[in-house]
Image (cartoon, coloured by chain):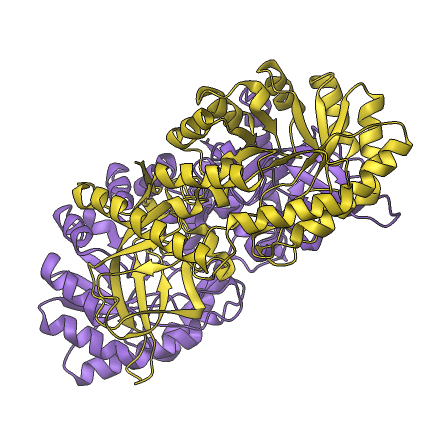
Chain colours: A purple, B yellow
Amino acid sequence: MHLYRNSDLRVNAMTERIKNFLRQRRGDGPCVVVDLDIVQDNYLAFERALPDTRVFYAVKANPAPEILALLASLGSSFDCASVPEIEMALAAGAGPDRISFGNTIKKERDVARAFELGVRLFAVDCEAEVEKISRAAPGAQVFCRILCDGAGADWPLSRKFGCAPSMAPQVLEHAHRLGLVAHGVSFHVGSQQANVEAWDLALGSAAAIFREMAERGIVLSMVNLGGGFPARYLKDVPGVPRYGEAILRGLAKHFGNRIPQTIIEPGRGMVGDAGMIEAEVVLISKKSEAEDEIRWVYLDIGKFNGLAETMDEAIRYPIRTDKDEDRKTPCVLAGPTCDSVDVLYEKTPYELPVSLSIGDKVLIEACGAYTTTYSAVAFNGFEPLRSYVI
Amino acid sequence: MHLYRNSDLRVNAMTERIKNFLRQRRGDGPCVVVDLDIVQDNYLAFERALPDTRVFYAVKANPAPEILALLASLGSSFDCASVPEIEMALAAGAGPDRISFGNTIKKERDVARAFELGVRLFAVDCEAEVEKISRAAPGAQVFCRILCDGAGADWPLSRKFGCAPSMAPQVLEHAHRLGLVAHGVSFHVGSQQANVEAWDLALGSAAAIFREMAERGIVLSMVNLGGGFPARYLKDVPGVPRYGEAILRGLAKHFGNRIPQTIIEPGRGMVGDAGMIEAEVVLISKKSEAEDEIRWVYLDIGKFNGLAETMDEAIRYPIRTDKDEDRKTPCVLAGPTCDSVDVLYEKTPYELPVSLSIGDKVLIEACGAYTTTYSAVAFNGFEPLRSYVI
């Protein structure tokens, strides 16, 4: 309970700082405001929870230059999905030794460009990718991503990234034979992972690969524990310290006294709860005159200008209004575009105050991750989400 | 059959013109190329099929200035979802009398801005929206959108837009009492609607509303037949003439000898088959060494940089390669980002040649609609889809 109470205090403090900013804002239209103090708190919490683990911030979660610069100054490393993300991390002050090209799907010319920029750490999950790296980044370190079932995550990862653990030794041996450094193994337990034990099974697979490689005469040295650390949306989640404890237990259980180097790649866990969106109620209506007809509440933000992660109603954001003391009734919540998929919550309606009116502002919490860059360029003519980092 | 043969010839002709352009292109990365000749053919086909109907192109499908300018010069009107779309239509040469503000969800200040720009035709689906328009666009024409079940559409419209037909007379009478012109009724039978009879039921509802309003002493004059006209993806669809015939039959059946003014709002049907995406194979791999393991083919285009409409595998694009004569086997097809939802076809795998290699180009057909503006700003650092209109 202690952790949550702390977290509540923190969220309230954030609310005040961001609310002050919003009171003075002159612009029109929805925006997200990210509070760097919270990002710093989160970084330090990861460091404390896993003191021997290097933190590689997943740039894709929010690549705002101010966030990257803060994290670079705190000593963070960076997990990059593309050459532009590598360039952003470098521009923020991180040396290339603090950058991992973590996408398993890379064009060979992008590998070459990253290598030119000094990057020496690459993700792979098959022999074809190893071959690209051996040609375009000779001598670099590679880690092999393995599949992991992601049970317990709000946003399970499917099979897109990684190979079966049984295939990993062959991929890593291939790298070794082609002159690369077979550096280690990575996995991802699934985004917004609420089960602190999710890492245990994957660590078991990783340890087995370490043993198998040792038998082949190749010594692996690193386990990339991936991301998956949750932000706090409406559903409660454990705090970072509990993830740290569970991971340390798993490492000890599977690797004994030969604990490998470890890295983590928090994205959502680093910036998710540091951002808040302000939006406006555009329309409230009913579809018929029936007594029990549900209200539809339309905001000026939706799936195409910031809230893409409401897809399948996966992420349920906390929404605050100035009228939260009033009685609440369920609503369907939708975005402003002429697109029928631009509905945020319909299968599980959202409770909002009966007194909510057209023109009212709403605050949507925990919007620091996967909102700005997910926005569509100009869908229906609506501009992408504006972002302020304070 | 005759229609399909024509259509095949047309698609092949388009292929050649676009292929010539692509052969000379120097840029890197995926792009969409739109052929204005096809857009013109499509516009003329709608005019021929429904000679007494005004065509309002749904700008949101593809707002490229060259497309808007061509359609404006052909005499098209424009269905706009936002003030920026209205400004684009005006910039393309359409007068405000050729513009409909067709979004049922509008901020009052955006209604005022549209009115200032000369727009006099607005969509509504509830009394609250009528009230905004009466204040911000006094005396304007409004049409009331009614719900319609969308059965038969690949992308059904849910209940986001429109009210129950039984509520429409009250909404329109409210408009009349507030000094607006109660102009008519609109509906949308669902995007990519393959059933030409889909309009019949909705026309019946519209006619009933006309009768009810006449009893209240208010004469409606217009039926907005909406969009829904399909593009030709992998699944065969009827040609525009068959839609025209079915709609004319429906109008005669429900309105007898008092046929109202009509408008249509094609978007996908106007530009969908006029565009083609060129993309590149980034990686081909398998997840394990099992004999029957399926290939994963990763392209440099995915859900976040152009192919958002593969969501739920709703739209199945035709994909051409230079190796289509070879034997084909099923693949999972995925995009290039570090996002597990960025998978195009997995539940129903896609047949591609066994000889397909990393670095090969692929052509994705019928990508003229809902690709460019649906692109994310910079997700994972990847730039939005580039567009060329020729």
Residue A81 visible at all: no
* Residue at image point 30% right, 48% down: B13
Q: Nearer the viewer, residue A221 or B314?
A: B314
Q: Is residue A335 left or right of residue A185?
A: right
A194 left or right of B24 in image: right
Location of residue B199 in the rendering, given as x and y in whole percent from the top left corner: 67, 49
Measured as percent of width and height from the top left, residue A155 is found at 50, 61
Q: Is residue A79 visible?
A: yes
**Relative to the observer, which residue lies in front, A220 or B183?**
B183
Which of the 4 quarters of the picture holds residue B187? top right
Number of numbered discs present? 0
Q: Position of residue B225 (x, y in %)?
A: 65, 41
Q: Is residue B375 above or below residue A346?
A: above
Report whether B305 appears left or right of B174.
left
Instruction: Say which quarter of the image contains residue B174.
Output: top right
Residue at 62%, 41% (x, y): give it.
Answer: B226
**Residue at image x 22%, y 59%?**
A122
Say whether residue B292 is left or right of residue A216: right
Q: Where in the figure is residue A324, as x and y percent of width and height?
A: 75, 39
- Quarter of the rendering occupied by the N terminus of chain A: bottom right
Q: In this rendered view, identify the residue nearer to me: A264 or B201.
A: B201
